[in-house]
Image: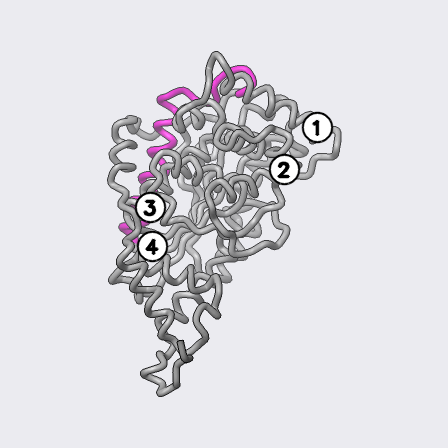
Amino acid sequence: METEMSWETIDEVARAIAPIDEGWLQKACAHLDTLTKPIGSLGRLEDLAAQIVAIRQDRFADPLNKAVYVFAADHGITEEGVSAYPRAVTYQMVLNFLGEGAAINVLARQHGAALHVVDVGVDADLAHAPGLLHRKVRRGTRNMLKDAAMSEEEVAQALSVGARFGDEAAAAGYSLLAIGEMGIGNTTAASAITCALTGAPAANATGRGTGLESEGHTHKIRIVEAVVAKHCLPPSGSLAPFEILRCLGGLEIAAMVGMVLAAARHRIVVVADGFISTAAAALAVAIEPNVHGYLIAGHRSEEPGHQLLLYHLKLTPILSLGMRLGEGTGAVLAMPIIESALYLYTRMATFASAGVSEASR
């Protein structure tokens, strides 16, 4: 088990996050306008390039070293029948990741992203699983319909797991990180977090997750409504970000929050995947708004709550492929486009260097 990270220490991580540099951002935009193309004609690629240059500053031309971290944990709310799949699938899919048989294995291998699988709260004994990063805080969260999902100590430990991986990623020279997850029941947690952060009703924030039929979906909405009412309505009232995470979150969500905070502190580009990882990113932004400048939305999930979070964060996703898998798959799929944006920025000729006439103003 990880040594506890105090709230003060997490707060120190958050306070150390600087906003992305506006001077570098303006310099990047000016350079883009000198390239041999009509101004703005590369669309979203120009925004991505400028953002990365502003984050990386004088290191912007260095190759992007890519990694994806998949955090796995179980959820006590599965006792309420909110998933089409049994809880054991979390454990089974972790073994699938380690056996290199999952979608994230295929995509990470194809796109050259180092894959790290972390057990932060799987309800199974994985002590002897080769290749797994063992950081278990406890075997799943509590049932948040009956109690807070985590204690203060547990959420601090899970935040610490992610923050330390963020520090290790920086030390390893990674400059483009994808965050992903595995945990049966975690779309229910993400839906409740979305309601708490945005004020959206449960019916708007709750999707079918792993593929619930209509009756199961209706039941899941009722559970999310009850969870939000228990923890977020009077007399409890609106909650601070840490309390939202403690009451409604998951161990893997907390770890992703910690990783996003630490990565932003180290000026690393973070690509959020789908609904659950974007819920973690939204909590990180709620803790420290400067995190926003380091975030890229890899794709738009089919989960309705994901669209609410993207709107809440004012993030434009790179891809929209009708996906709802998780694991970091959408984030890794977006990485080649991010690399292309930076490659265009650093390799295209300018009007002056190519001897091409510019447009009349």
- Of marks 3 and 1, the one in the foreground: 1
Q: Mark 3 points at which residue?
A: 263
User: Alpha carbon of mark 3 to alpha carbon of mark 1: how far?
Assistant: 38 Å
Say whether residue 234 is left or right of residue 205. Answer: left
Say what secondary structure mark 3 lies in: helix
Say what secondary structure mark 4 lies in: loop
- Of marks 4 and 2, the one in the foreground: 2
User: Alpha carbon of mark 2 to alpha carbon of mark 3: how far?
Assistant: 28 Å
User: Alpha carbon of mark 4 to alpha carbon of mark 1: how far?
Assistant: 42 Å
Q: Earlier in the sequence, mark 1 or mark 2?
A: 2
Q: Earlier in the sequence, mark 3 or mark 4?
A: 4
Give the class, few, some or many, for how many residues have Cα within 10 Å of label 3's Cα (few <14, many ≥20): many
Q: Earlier in the sequence, mark 3 or mark 1?
A: 1
Say whether residue 27 is left or right of residue 248. Answer: left
| Residue type at numbered disc 1 | Thr
The residue shown at (64%, 38%) is 210
Q: Mark 4 points at which residue?
A: 174
User: Alpha carbon of mark 4 to alpha carbon of mark 2: how far?
Assistant: 31 Å
The part of the image, by quadrant, that contains residue 214 is top right
Q: Please say if the residues under marks 1 and 2 sit with CB atoms less than 8 Å apart.
A: no
User: Alpha carbon of mark 3 to alpha carbon of mark 4: how far?
Assistant: 10 Å
The residue shown at (39%, 27%) is 242
Give the class, few, some or many, for how many residues have Cα within 10 Å of label 1's Cα (few <14, many ≥20): some
The residue shown at (62%, 45%) is 302
Q: Name the residue under label 1.
A: 218
Say what secondary structure mark 1 lies in: helix
- Give the magenta range: 143-172
User: Alpha carbon of mark 1 to alpha carbon of mark 2: how far?
Assistant: 12 Å
Q: In this view, does 225 lie above or below 265?
A: above
Q: Please say if the residues under marks 2 and 3 sit with CB atoms less than 8 Å apart.
A: no
